[in-house]
Image (cartoon, rainbow, N blue to C red):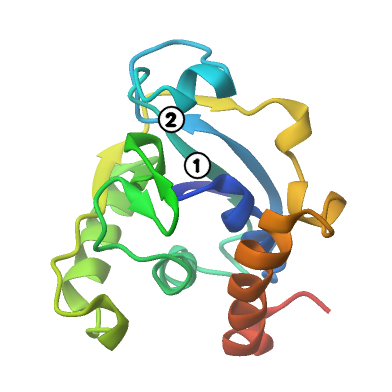
Amino acid sequence: MEKATFGGGCFWCLEPVFEDLEGVKEVIPGYAGGHKPHPTYEEVCTGTTGHAEVVQVTYDPEVIRYRDLLEVFFSIHDPTTPNRQGADVGHQYRSIILTHNPQQEAEARAFMASLPWDPHWEGEKIVTEVVPLKAFYPAEDYHRRYFRLNPEKAFCRLVIAPKYEKFRKKFAPRLKA
């Protein structure tokens, strides 16, 4: 098993997507990329910890490649908006790839350089950070599987569900049975 860590807005939006991919064994929402050890959700929301909301994905590289995870990551968020994804604004919502080894860093940079331009990005520059992971702090338990446990909540219905359905259509052949 290997790990990959991505931040692209609210971790509630990322978690269900990666959970559904064949070869993904576990997805944990959390915080990374900042300077404060063991931050809380409330502290991260202030924007003073330097952390981003992220998901850490444990996957089987014999079933799904890191490059496949990158493809999914760049299809489910806007990598051109600094410190923002939709209505979520702040440094904690930035687009970031936290690499676990030099191979992941090289692969992420090469993938970004080869990205076909998406018309939804309106000609903007990709601002996704690629940095080595120094520490990952799991989020509080109530954040785990949030979308699946709270489908009736307005944020889940109005924000997460449309992204999730778009992902499921685009990546149908790669989904768990």
Could you classify mark 2 by the number of other residues whose Cα lies within 10 Å: few (under 14), some (14-19), or many (20 or more)? many
At which x and y percent is residue 124? 15, 71
At which x and y percent is residue 117? 22, 84
**Which residue sits at x=27%, y=50%?**
105
User: Circles 2 and 1: CB distance less than 8 Å?
Assistant: yes
Q: Earlier in the sequence, mark 2 or mark 1?
A: 2
Q: Is residue 126 visible?
A: yes
Q: In the image shown, does 173 or 89 lie closer to the viewer?
A: 89
Which amino acid lies under the numbered mark 1 shown in the image of this protein?
Answer: Val
Which quadrant holds the C terminus?
A: bottom right
Which amino acid lies under the numbered mark 2 shown in the image of this protein?
Answer: Ala
**Which residue sits at x=65%, y=72%?**
164
As drawn, is 145 to the left or to the right of 58? right
| Kind of element beneath mark 2 | strand
At which x and y percent is residue 146? 76, 46
At which x and y percent is residue 156? 71, 58
Q: Image quadrant of residue 47?
A: top left
Alpha carbon distance from label 2 to label 1: 7 Å
What numbered label is drawn on residue 54?
A: 1
Residue to which mark 2 is pinned: 32
